[in-house]
């Protein structure tokens, strides 16, 4: 699920209201107990439902924060959240808003890492990617709503550039929301299957491919592709951790190769299969903490070692992006 894109206002509103619906239905107590953003003031007390033990011990790097052009003061709110949670946001930015985010990232390099959302089908996508690079962007994403599968050769020129820049590229994978029930849409989840990322990762080995949503529901394909490709990772944002909350231990059968002396390089030579995950929230700002707690519940259910938890929550991305301390 994702709410980025360059669609018109009415569509965005609709997406946001649907997101709100899923948030309310998710049983994520922290999110639903919050009345408003004001409750998340960095100077305030812990919100109801948030225990001190839930507060992060280490730095969090969030691969999946959408720049919300509709929300006045979004960047200020993000900076406050970053301070409160010790968080760095990979900020997925529609091309139209590239300059304001490039400037914010230059002023706040510890809090904001700029990623450019481009439409892979746009006739001038290569020029857009070059401009993003010139502005100091660090990668692309979230790529989605493609007209062809991700491995279509017409997308290779954009990937070629990302490969040259050694960028991270975040791809939506799996089921995607339907924005409009009343009009025809040229959108299909099947074009965004995780299996298509395998070819991108192999043809363009200097790209770090990050698949959003772990291919929901094709988790097995996602994990197997990550297992064989050192430059492939997935986030678990979206509805998965809500859907699976009563059976999180099942992920041990999907990420099954821990400590098997696998010959594929991993960050920090971590032997846990779970090191192929990175933290991503894909939430509005008031929900980031709730998603972090869902990740922690997964770690507990699957006995993910402490060292690997740190890599997932930030260590891997800090390394890949060479972020300042
Ligand atoms: Zn998405």
Image (cartoon, rainbow, N blue to C red):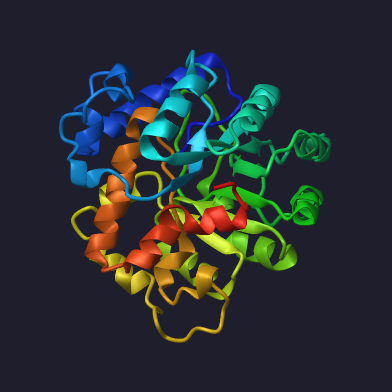
> Looking at the picture, does residue 160 appear above or below residue 41?
below
State which quadrant residue 205 falls in: bottom right
- Residue farthest bottom in this picture: 261
Asked if one can make out residue 183 in the rendered structure from this viewpoint, the answer is: yes
The reply, left or right, for residue 200 in relation to residue 87 is right
Residue 212 image position (x, y, % from top left): 49, 50
Residue 190 point in image, percent of width and height: 54, 52
Q: Answer left or right for 266 relative to 255.
A: right
- At a point 33% along the width and 25% down the height, the residue shown is 42
Residue 123 seen anywhere in this rendered image of the structure: no
Question: Looking at the image, is 179 positioned above or below residue 70?
Answer: below
Q: Position of residue 236 (x, y in %)?
A: 40, 52
Asked if residue 26 is positioned above or below residue 205 in the image, the reply reads above
Percent x, y for residue 217?
Answer: 39, 56
Q: Residue at x 26, y 32 (%)?
A: 31
Q: Which quarter of the figure has residue 144?
A: top right
Q: Nearer the viewer, residue 97 or 267?
A: 267
Q: Residue at x 51, y 59 (%)?
A: 316
- Count up the numbered dots: 0
Residue at (39%, 78%) from the top-left corner? 258
């Amino acid at each position: 699920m994702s709410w980025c894109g360059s669609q018109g206002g009415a569509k965005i509103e609709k997406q946001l209201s649907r997101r709100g619906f899923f948030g309310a239905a998710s049983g994520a107590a922290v999110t639903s107990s919050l009345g408003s953003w004001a409750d998340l003031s960095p100077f305030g007390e812990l919100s109801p439902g948030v225990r001190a033990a839930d507060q992060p011990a280490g730095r969090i790097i969030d691969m999946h924060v959408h720049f919300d052009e509709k929300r006045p003061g979004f960047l200020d709110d993000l900076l406050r959240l970053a301070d409160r949670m010790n968080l760095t946001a990979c900020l997925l930015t529609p091309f139209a808003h590239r300059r304001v985010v490039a400037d914010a990232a230059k002023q706040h390099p510890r809090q904001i890492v700029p990623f450019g959302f481009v439409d892979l089908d746009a006739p001038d996508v290569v020029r857009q990617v070059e401009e993003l690079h010139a502005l100091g962007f660090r990668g692309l994403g979230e790529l989605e709503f493609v007209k062809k599968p991700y491995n279509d050769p017409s997308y290779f020129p954009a990937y070629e550039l990302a490969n040259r820049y050694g960028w991270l590229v975040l791809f939506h994978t799996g089921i995607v929301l339907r924005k409009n029930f009343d009009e025809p849409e040229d959108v299909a989840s099947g074009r965004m299957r995780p299996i298509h990322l395998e070819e991108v990762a192999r043809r363009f080995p200097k790209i770090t491919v990050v698949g959003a949503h772990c291919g929901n529901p094709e988790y097995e394909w996602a994990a197997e592709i990550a297992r064989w490709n050192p430059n492939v990772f997935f986030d678990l944002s979206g509805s998965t951790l809500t859907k699976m909350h009563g059976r999180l231990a099942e992920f041990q059968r999907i990420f099954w190769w821990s400590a098997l002396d696998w010959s594929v390089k991993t960050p920090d030579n971590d032997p846990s299969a779970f090191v192929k995950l990175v933290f991503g929230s894909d939430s509005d700002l008031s929900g980031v903490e709730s998603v972090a707690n869902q990740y922690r519940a997964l770690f507990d259910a699957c006995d993910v070692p402490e060292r690997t938890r740190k890599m997932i929550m930030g260590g891997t991305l800090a390394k890949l992006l060479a972020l300042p301390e």
